[in-house]
Image: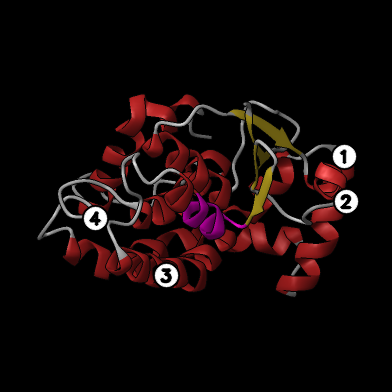
Amino acid sequence: MTRILYTLCGADMDRPFSPHCWKVVLALKHKGLDFEERPTPFTQVPDLEDGFSKTVPILRDGQELIRDSFDIALYLEEKYPDAPTLFGGEGGKALSRFVERFSQSIIHPAVTGIAVADIHDMLGETDRAYFRRTREALLGRTMEELRAASPAAIAAFAAKLEPVRQMLGYQPFFGGETPLFADYILFGALQWLRITAGAEVFAPDDPVAHWFERCLDLHDGVGRLVTAA
């Protein structure tokens, strides 16, 4: 049986960058499951698996098709209970839901403010037109205006992670001594920033930066296989 993970890329298929897809990459590695990754440009995603989903990640596991990173993690936990746990029980699922909401409501908009123009530049010609049209409509500014605002977004970024910084004073991961899916959720957002913009948003001694480096080293350093921008 071949597992296939459809992820998101720009013009360079070797640089998949979606935060949601990176969550699933680490979740599959955490479970010790082999898979084939198939990076896909934005405008080709609706054609995958007969239009199964408008967005990635999509996981094909034999005859099963699952979309949405959290739903994929829940599926993996139920399907492979003897592999290392992604949640450590119901409390870990609740923690992961909180981290997901924090990441998508606070951190994702901040990354967008820094990296949206860089993402545009990574895309092929067809995807660039689509991306510019949709993101400018969503964000209410031109790509050029967004690029000009990036330095201010970089300066404001680290402060948004102060609760995480304080938590890391007690333990090395959200999961305690070892990572859980909650760690992979926030990792995905910072990996998205690293690959698309490569912006220096943390001081060298920042505990969040150290946590991110630990996450990059997990599972034989899979996070480092794609270099920073």
Q: Nearer the viewer, mark 4 or mark 1?
A: 4
Magenta-drawn segment: 68-75
Spatial distance from mark 4 to mark 2, Cα to Cα? Answer: 41 Å
Residue 72, magenta (yes or no)? yes
**Pointer 4 residue:** 175
| SS label for mark 1 | helix
Q: Tell me the number on the disc at residue 97.
A: 3
Question: Disc 4 vs disc 2: Cβ atoms closer than 8 Å?
Answer: no
**Pointer 2 residue:** 129
| SS label for mark 2 | helix
Q: Tell me the number on the disc at residue 125.
A: 1
Residue 151 visible? The answer is yes
Q: Nearer the viewer, mark 2 or mark 3?
A: 3
Mark 3 surroundings: few (<14), some (14-19) or many (≥20) residues within 10 A: some
Name the residue furthest left: 170
Mark 1 surroundings: few (<14), some (14-19) or many (≥20) residues within 10 A: few
